[in-house]
């Protein structure tokens, strides 16, 4: 019997051919008129034969199909065989809007209207399945939760909104620029607002978001100067879109991007991006939304966006702004001050705030400004750029803050060494031992915040503070070298004290995400000024482990190398802190597939710790355990087993038999016993590790998923296939829930589910698992990672069993090339793939 007969009208031949091709690619057989009814054959007899031989019929629904007198007899044969539809013999596929009547209206259909190719393929293949169509991964939210049947109340914010600034009641001018911005956005391209700092790029983006908020269901602000912070802000959108809750950042970014690409009425604002490459992976493909970028860089944006330059206010705009901000109408004084401040929006804002706060006239302020400016630069040549305007207005404002609330000066000095946006007010809490004495009282801090905000030196909300980057720069510039070093040290101590010690634990990730930009900013300043180097090293270590756990391996590697350099400079090359950092760097390199680099790290760290602690210390055991992991991955199984046995002996003597550290080593010992063919020993190890971890970690933890997955693979090799699948399914559920469906650990579990399905004879779904695991690993780990080679090998096996020898050969060759480059010709994995390739006999 043949799988499907494709029934269609000649007007829909292109659709019919695409459908037939997809079905055959998925392993089904088809009878397709254009391919199978050759010249010279009897057409009516061919049609009759096809209707008798095919098990099911796909009917390609359109106006032409329904209007044709030739198509009804084709599907009527199958309706007679299955009048109730219980067998699912008739599969209607609608490719054009058309109203169904009669018998066809009673049959459930597959709808391809309006879908892109990937979505249409999925809908088709899911629709022809007999089995329940539950997906392997959590479905993405199909639309924005904010869509309602009734219109939004005029003036109400969009349901999804995180713009960090209030609407500026003093926003002035820029009408032409805002009009150009709107026109460019509606043309479909992103828009890059570029210009020097202090020109008001962010204010224009902020004004646009409020002015056009009725046009959007989603408005999302993304801090874009640092790649890790950009990724974090972008990923935070997932929960507001009601996407499935997961914690793998790469997966979340992909899900958000896909969701936006399938929807409309959204606005993304990438604030302070440096270059197009930094945001290109975050721009949704498709969808009907808008993107605004603010950047100081004027180059390169034309390749991906409409570039609009933000310049200084002209004289008329400057005068209008001062009138509105100060509520004063003195034309001469306003014109003179506008001229003096040279149209710089930030300087004009600080001047206006000062005038309003002090209740002085425009003339008074102009005199103060000119006098102070002369004082500031009397012994130097005044700067030729616009920054001296901010410098002068800053000094005038700070004089008043110092007079009203002296602690405000300390607060601004501290904020100048953190990231500019979203500084958590919780950092400045009573009892924080790292705060300077002047900021340890909450009421005093609140008064300082109010004073700084009144003079437009900061922006503040109930939860956080923000400072303009130019204000931060001027603040740092006005400090002495010694003061700069002191405040950089305070910032590091503050953030390091708040950053979770166990940053690799997913339960701390929410806190880590908030503190990440401030950790990076504080570390940059501290390292440049050589301040608090020990604490800087500790902080970079924690941030590196956090990013590694989030599968941000390249960023983690860079920060851990930075931490290592500091540790060696501060502690010397043979210190335990150096060993700990080298060990962590080894973990990252191992995850990236650089086994030789990881092995060298572990060897050096082990040598240092053995010299410090002796041979039987738990710190030594940790590195011995990691060293065993590398040996296992390199195929040195006996050496790996000896490492685990040594580490286990140390840990059991130190912690007892029921400790989480013991579970880690027992699980790894089970892994090497499994690789050596000792299934009974491996099973006992995995069961013991599960028993320990279930009590300590609970049911939903990534380590639990690893143990359960490993036990499932042993059960599979013991031919207990049903129990194996039960364990693998449970491990996959945990990983997808905690780490997300695009994490490398999830990919490993999906790969193993493919092995189970393969043993069950379900080659089609096994192939899907291998393809999905391959796609994850290529994206996260890179195209030349050893795990990618394993996925290609497994996919090759499936293609071989399905008779696609050409495809199998291609997969084996790719896998072999990777393994030879990574491990050499004598590695067990290399030998397995070479054997598989040779078995093809071609």
Image (spheres, grey):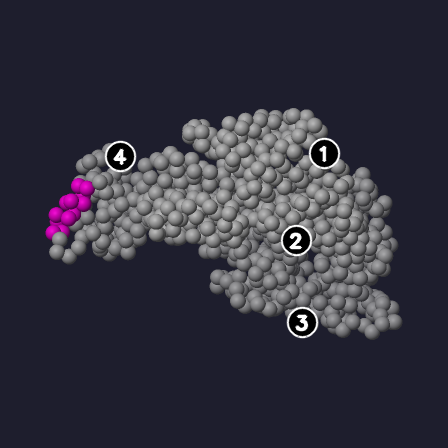
**Marks 1 and 4 in Cβ contact (< 8 Å):** no
| Disc 4 to disc 3, C-alpha distance | 75 Å
Q: Residue at x 82, y 67 (%)?
A: 369
| Disc 3 to disc 2, C-alpha distance | 44 Å
Looking at the image, is mark 4 or mark 2 earlier in the sequence?
Answer: 4
Which is more foreground, mark 4 or mark 2? 2
Instruction: Please tell me whether mark 4 sits on a helix, a strand or a loop.
Output: loop
Q: Is residue 113 left or right of residue 561?
A: left
Instruction: Please tell me whether mark 2 sits on a helix, a strand or a loop.
Output: helix
Instruction: Out of 42 and 466, give the one closest to the viewer.
Output: 42
Instruction: Out of 58 and 665, give the one closest to the viewer.
Output: 665
Local packing at callout 3 (Cα closer than 10 Å; few below 14, some 14-19, many 20+) is some
Looking at the image, is mark 1 or mark 4 earlier in the sequence?
Answer: 4
Q: Residue at x 76, y 41 (%)?
A: 611
**Marks 4 and 2 in Cβ contact (< 8 Å):** no
Looking at the image, is mark 4 or mark 3 earlier in the sequence?
Answer: 4
Residue on which the image places disc 1 = 616
- The tag on residue 87 is 4
Residue on which the image places disc 2 = 558
Residue on which the image places disc 3 = 314
98 vs 472: above or below: above
How far across and down, in percent of the image, does residue 448 sit? 80, 49
Q: Quadrant of residue 607?
A: top right
How far across and down, in percent of the image, does residue 270 sit? 59, 57
Indicate whether residue 475 is drawn in magenta.
no
Q: Which residues are magenta?
A: 42-53
Which is more foreground, mark 3 or mark 2? 2
355 vs 159: above or below: below
Local packing at callout 2 (Cα closer than 10 Å; few below 14, some 14-19, many 20+) is some
Which is more foreground, mark 1 or mark 4? 1
Looking at the image, is mark 1 or mark 2 earlier in the sequence?
Answer: 2
């Amino acid at each position: 019997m043949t799988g499907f007969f494709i029934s269609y009208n000649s007007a829909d031949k292109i659709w019919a051919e695409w459908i037939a091709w997809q079905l055959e690619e998925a392993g089904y057989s088809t009878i397709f008129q254009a391919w199978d009814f050759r010249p010279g054959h009897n057409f009516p007899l061919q049609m009759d034969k096809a209707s008798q031989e095919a098990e099911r019929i796909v009917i390609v629904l359109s106006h032409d199909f329904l209007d044709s007198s030739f198509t009804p007899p084709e599907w009527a044969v199958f309706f007679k065989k299955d009048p109730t539809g219980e067998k699912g013999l008739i599969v209607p596929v609608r490719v054009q809007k058309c109203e169904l009547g009669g018998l066809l209206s009673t049959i459930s259909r597959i709808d391809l209207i309006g879908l892109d190719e990937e979505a249409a393929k999925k809908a088709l293949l899911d629709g022809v399945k007999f089995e329940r169509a539950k997906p392997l991964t959590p479905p993405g939210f199909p639309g924005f939760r904010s869509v309602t049947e009734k219109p939004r109340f005029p003036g109400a914010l969009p349901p999804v909104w995180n713009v960090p600034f209030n609407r500026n009641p003093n926003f002035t001018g820029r009408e032409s620029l805002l009009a150009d911005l709107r026109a460019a956005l509606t043309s479909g391209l992103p828009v890059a607002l570029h210009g020097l700092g202090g020109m008001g790029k962010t204010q224009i983006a902020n004004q646009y978001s409020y002015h056009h908020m009725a046009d959007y269901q989603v408005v999302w602000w993304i801090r874009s100067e640092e790649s890790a912070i950009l990724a974090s802000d972008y990923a935070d959108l997932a929960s507001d879109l009601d996407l499935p809750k997961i914690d793998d950042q790469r997966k979340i970014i992909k899900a958000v991007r896909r969701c936006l690409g399938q929807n409309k009425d959204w606005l993304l604002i990438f604030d302070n991006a440096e270059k197009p490459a930094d945001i290109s992976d975050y721009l949704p493909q498709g969808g009907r939304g808008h993107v605004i970028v603010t950047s100081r860089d004027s180059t390169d944006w034309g390749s991906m966006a409409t570039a609009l330059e933000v310049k200084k206010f002209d004289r008329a705009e400057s005068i209008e702004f001062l009138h509105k901000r100060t509520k004063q109408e003195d034309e001469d004084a306003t014109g003179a001050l506008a001229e003096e401040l040279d149209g710089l929006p930030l300087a004009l804002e600080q001047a206006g705030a000062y005038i309003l706060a002090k209740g002085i006239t425009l003339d008074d302020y102009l005199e103060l400004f000119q006098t102070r400016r002369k004082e500031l630069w009397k012994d130097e040549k005044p700067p030729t750029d616009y920054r001296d305007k901010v410098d002068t207005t800053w000094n005038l404002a700070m004089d008043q803050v110092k007079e009203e609330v002296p602690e405000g000066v300390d607060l601004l000095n501290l904020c100048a060494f953190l990231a500019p946006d979203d500084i958590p007010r919780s950092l400045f809490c009573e009892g924080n031992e790292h705060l300077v004495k002047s900021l340890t009282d909450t009421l005093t801090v609140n008064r300082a915040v109010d004073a700084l905000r009144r003079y437009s030196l900061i922006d503040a909300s109930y939860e956080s503070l923000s400072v303009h980057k130019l204000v931060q720069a001027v603040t740092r510039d006005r400090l002495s070298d010694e003061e700069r070093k002191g405040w950089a040290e305070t910032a590091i101590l503050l953030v390091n004290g708040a950053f979770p010690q166990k940053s690799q634990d997913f339960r701390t990730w929410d806190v880590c995400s908030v503190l990440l930009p401030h950790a990076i900013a504080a570390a940059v300043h501290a390292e440049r000024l050589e301040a608090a180097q020990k604490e800087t090293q500790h902080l970079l270590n924690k941030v590196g482990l956090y990013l590694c756990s989030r599968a941000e391996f390249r960023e983690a590697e860079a920060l851990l190398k930075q931490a290592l350099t500091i540790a060696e400079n501060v502690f010397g090359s043979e210190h335990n802190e150096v060993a700990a950092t080298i060990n962590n760097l080894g973990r990252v390199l191992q995850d990236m597939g650089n086994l030789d680099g990881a092995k060298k790290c572990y060897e050096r760290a082990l040598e240092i710790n053995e010299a410090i602690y002796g041979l039987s210390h738990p710190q030594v055991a940790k590195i011995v355990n990691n060293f065993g992991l590398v040996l296992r991955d390199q195929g040195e199984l006996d050496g790996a087993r000896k490492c685990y046995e040594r580490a286990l002996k140390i840990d059991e003597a130190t912690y007892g038999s029921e400790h989480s550290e013991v579970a880690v080593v027992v699980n790894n010992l089970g892994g090497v016993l499994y690789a050596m063919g000792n299934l009974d020993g491996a099973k006992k190890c995995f069961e013991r590790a599960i028993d320990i971890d279930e009590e300590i970690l609970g049911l939903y933890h990534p380590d639990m998923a690893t143990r359960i997955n490993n036990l499932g693979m042993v059960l599979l090799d013991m031919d207990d296939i049903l129990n194996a699948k039960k364990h693998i399914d449970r491990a996959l559920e945990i990983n997808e829930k905690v780490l997300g469906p695009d994490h490398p650990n999830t990919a490993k579990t999906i790969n193993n589910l493919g092995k189970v399905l393969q043993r069950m004879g379900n080659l089609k779904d096994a192939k899907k698992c291998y393809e999905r695991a391959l796609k994850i690993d290529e994206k996260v780990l890179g195209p030349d990672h050893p795990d990618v080679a394993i996925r290609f090998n497994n996919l090759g096996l499936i293609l071989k069993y399905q008779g696609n020898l050409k495809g199998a050969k291609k997969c084996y060759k790719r896998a072999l090339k990777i393994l030879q480059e990574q491990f050499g010709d004598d590695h067990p994995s290399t030998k397995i793939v070479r054997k598989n390739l040779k078995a093809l006999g071609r």
